[in-house]
Image: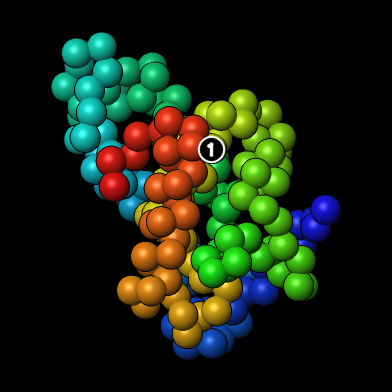
């Protein structure tokens, strides 16, 4: 089993090292998380509560909190979309289920609850292990296909 390492801190746009050890391209502000959550919430309603109002419910607040905590952990990972694994630095890598289990254990959360957030991150805030490949349509298509297959397998509806 391959274990987690540290992020390489490589800025995907300029090749410059980032002091924080996190790629500038993957930094997610709370405002970006809120916009993403609003976008996701607009696709569904829970208990017949309008979608945006759902974020103000206890379930919505829990979902929002979990999203922020999961995304924080995932900022250390880079996706190798072709080989379908996550690079964590120093040549180390993890499979999707290993990433989900690690994040769930780190956060003391249920892996099923974390899986949905990891798949959202893959489609919304993913970054490539190869900075020159990141953002290309081929890369986006590979990540989307991978995430969609995982959603089907676990019956998760992210409404791509």
Q: Where is residue 72 in the image (x, y as percent from the top left)?
A: 55, 49
Q: Residue at x 58, y 73 (%)?
A: 129
Q: In this view, does 132 lie above or below 121?
A: below
Q: Where is residue 124 in the image (x, y as percent from the top left)?
A: 38, 55
Q: Residue 28, can we see it?
A: no
Relative placement, left or right, of 57 versus 104 is left
Q: Is residue 134 above or below residue 85?
A: below
Q: Which residue is drawn at 24% across and 43% down?
A: 39
**Neighbours of disc 1 within 10 Å: few (<14), some (14-19), many (20+):** many
- Taking depth in this image into account, of 133 and 48 the one nearest to the observer is 133
Give the number of callouts. 1
Q: Is residue 121 above or below residue 112?
A: below
The structure's colour scheme is rainbow
Relative placement, left or right, of 55 versus 114 is left
The residue tagged with tag 1: helix, strand or loop? helix
Q: Position of residue 7 (x, y in %)?
A: 67, 67
Q: Which residue is drawn at 29% across and 47% down?
A: 160
Q: Is residue 91 above or below residue 43?
A: below
Q: Residue furthest top?
A: 47
Q: Residue 85, can we see it?
A: yes
Q: In which quarter of the image is residue 43?
A: top left
Q: Quadrant of residue 93?
A: bottom right
Q: Residue at x 70, y 56 (%)?
A: 94
Q: Position of residue 16 (x, y in %)?
A: 56, 86
- Taking depth in this image into account, of 18 and 91 the one nearest to the observer is 91
Relative placement, left or right, of 69 versus 97 is left
Q: Which residue lies furthest to the right in this view?
A: 1
Provide the residue designation for mark 1.
Answer: 115
């Amino acid at each position: 089993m391959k274990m987690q390492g540290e992020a390489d801190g490589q800025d995907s746009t300029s090749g410059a090292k980032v002091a924080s050890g996190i790629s500038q391209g993957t930094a997610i502000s709370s405002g970006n998380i809120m916009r993403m959550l609003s976008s996701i919430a607009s696709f569904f309603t829970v208990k017949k509560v309008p979608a945006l109002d759902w974020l103000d419910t206890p379930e919505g607040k829990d979902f929002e909190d979990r999203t922020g905590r999961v995304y924080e952990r995932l900022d250390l990972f880079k996706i190798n979309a072709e080989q379908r694994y996550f690079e964590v630095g120093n040549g180390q890598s993890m499979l999707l289920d290993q990433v989900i289990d690690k994040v769930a254990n780190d956060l003391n959360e249920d892996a099923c609850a974390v899986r949905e957030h990891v798949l959202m991150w893959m489609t919304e805030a993913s970054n490539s292990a190869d900075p020159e490949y990141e953002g290309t349509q081929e890369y986006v298509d590979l990540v989307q296909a991978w995430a969609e297959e995982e959603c089907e397998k676990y019956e998760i509806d992210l409404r791509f």
